[in-house]
Image (cartoon, grey):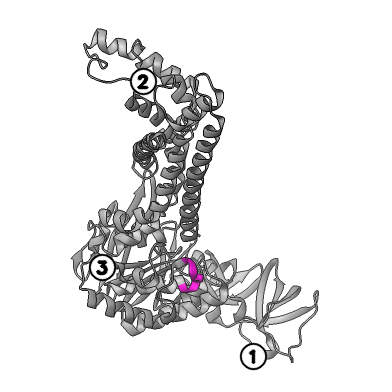
Amino acid sequence: MSYLSLSNVTKQFGDTTVVDNFNLEIAKGEFVSFLGPSGCGKTTTLRMVAGFETPSSGNILLNGVDITHNAPNQRNVGMIFQSYALFPNMTVAQNIGFGLKVRKEADDVVKQRVSEMISLIHLEAHANKYPYQLSGGQQQRVSLARALAIRPQVLLLDEPLSALDAKIRVSLRSEIRSIQKTLGITAIFVTHDQEEALSISDRVVVMNAGEIEQVGTPFEIYNFPKTRFVANFVGSLNTAKAEILDPASGLLNMEGIQLQTDDGTKNRKKGDTVTFAIRPERFSFVSEGKKENVVEGRVVNITFLGSVVRIQLQIGKTNFNMDTFNRPSLELPKIGDSCQVSCSKKAVLILED
Amino acid sequence: MLIELSIQISAITALGGGILGFLLAYSVTVGGLPKSLRPILMTFSGVASNFAGVPLAFAFVATIGRQGFITHILRDYLGVDVYSAGFNLYSFAGLSLVYMYFQFPLMVLIMAPALDGLKREWREAAENLGASSTQYWLKVALPVLLPSILGAMILLFGNAFGAYATAYALTGGRIGIVTIQIGAQIRGDVLYNPGLGYAMAVGMVIIMAISLAGYSWLQAKTERWLR
């Protein structure tokens, strides 16, 4: 049974539909990320769970209780904001204890919980400091502790790492995930950063224009994108159009070049035009491995990306990117050279538009 | 005694103007009044806070003076004679009312940006943690705003304390606030004791310096919090 359920949730601002018929079931203890570009409705959905926005239609159930129209202070949902939202007039300890104080918890309970939370975020030496005396990463950890101190049923994280620098972002996201697992708390994480979403989540909800494009594990989202949007948004991708030559065997024709896929041609007709996608890292030089889908391309450009080298190839009239691991023994072709590359049938994904 | 009168009128108008100005600023920033009213109030405040001295005194005399336009309307058409009821524009209360006219707009101008500085996320975080609106205001918003409010009131106090032309034009020197006394001692129509005038001026400078130091300290505290 799902712990948090959003059923047919729609949100309109005037004539604009920001979230359209959103359906999602989240299990207890699950970490779910909402991933999508700015304006796709992910934060609005999160704010509806928090109670800061009321759905135009649909229901939100938390542990079987309909909370759709409950005020934010009657939901027992913790939230972490992008801008930390720490109260500037209070110390770290006072910020963490705020939720317990307003709930009229006994002083010794407040003291003990605050102490536990400060230990959890490893800021024992900073308990009496004010927010302005802390770094961004420390402030966000205090914000996390403050949200967890009230023992919320669900933890909502609204782009909590966006304001931090890259190194802190990586370490803090691991810390958030570790704390979430330790406490077994259900969490929803909003982000537009695909790497963040894929690295931290049990499941990812990819959103676009107020609708869910795909829900799946990070592995499914990355390797088996269902739509062109997901394929383009998550990771880098080569896309092109092809004609189906044989639906049964998955034979495609792209500008006279034949490719084979084992993904989703059976329900289509011969002669249909489809969009297919291949991830850059799924290509390899023919000499390196398997020889399925062998095609010839001309090297247009070569870019070093640190651990990876990206080679741009012109195959037919279309440019494709190919990624290969950078290693000292790597023998790279020159710009203008022709070379044979291949990819497996499984690497050729048919996209729903 | 003279200082006391000046302190009284400054304190009363700082408090009255401060409260009125804060409420107006609150109404047009976070209070939910239509946004279209904000530029109107801010423009009015910008003009009114600088509208002091002889023109302001004359404007009040012409409207709610003994023979003022509004006084006449109230008396002739509504049967309300405010002067018979005890009101007197040329008294301490009347002078306070006139001072309020340039005091509350100054408070609006100072407090509107401070109220804008209250982040929406603070309210949401407080609500999310279980706080009611009252708890949010008492424990977060007002403590955050308090240095600004107190600082602004100190500024209003100083503003009224140094006023001269308005009081002189309105009362003709009948209400002996310090600035009028200094003028009388230095100008010397009847009284002439420049030394006493300068001594009183030094006293004023000290009080103003204390006020400004308090204002600066409170502003620094707010800025540090909101960094």
In what element is the residue under mark 1?
loop
Mark 1: few, some, or many residues within 10 Å (few <14, many ≥20)?
A: few
Inspect the magenta stretch and tell me whether residue A135 lies in it.
yes
Residue at left offset 41%, top offset 43%: B153
Provide the residue span drawn in magenta.
A132-138
Write down the chain letter for disc 3.
Answer: A
Q: Distance between the residues labelled 2 and 3?
A: 52 Å
Query: Which residue is identified by label 1?
Result: A289
Residue that carries the numbered disc 2 in the rendered image: B90
Q: At 32% across and 61% down in the image, what residue appears? A: B126
Residue A101, disc: 3
Residue neighbourhood size for the residue with mark 2, other residues' Cα within 10 Å, grouped as few (<14), some (14–19), many (≥20): many
Q: Determine if marks 2 and 1 fall on one subunit.
A: no
Tell which of A164 and B112 is nearer to you.
B112
The amino acid pointed to by label 1 is: Gly
Q: Which of marks 1 and 3 is in front?
A: 3
Q: Is residue B112 visible?
A: yes
Residue reaching furthest top?
A: B76
Residue A19, horizontal then vertical, whole percent: 37, 56
Relative side of A142 to A196, left or right? left
Q: Is residue A307 above or below residue A95?
A: below
Position of the N terminus of chain A, as image quadrant, is bottom left
- Closer mark to the observer between disc 2 and disc 1: 2
Q: Which amino acid does label 2 sit on?
A: Tyr
Residue A342 % position (x, y): 64, 82
Q: Mark 2 lies on which chain?
A: B
Q: Label 2, label 1: how many angstroms apart (C-alpha)?
A: 101 Å
The kind of residue on which mark 3 rests is Lys
Q: Check residue B99 for magenta coloring.
A: no
For the question of whether residue A28 can be seen, the reply is no
Judging from the image, mark 1 belongs to the subunit labelled A
Q: Nearer the viewer, mark 2 or mark 3?
A: 2
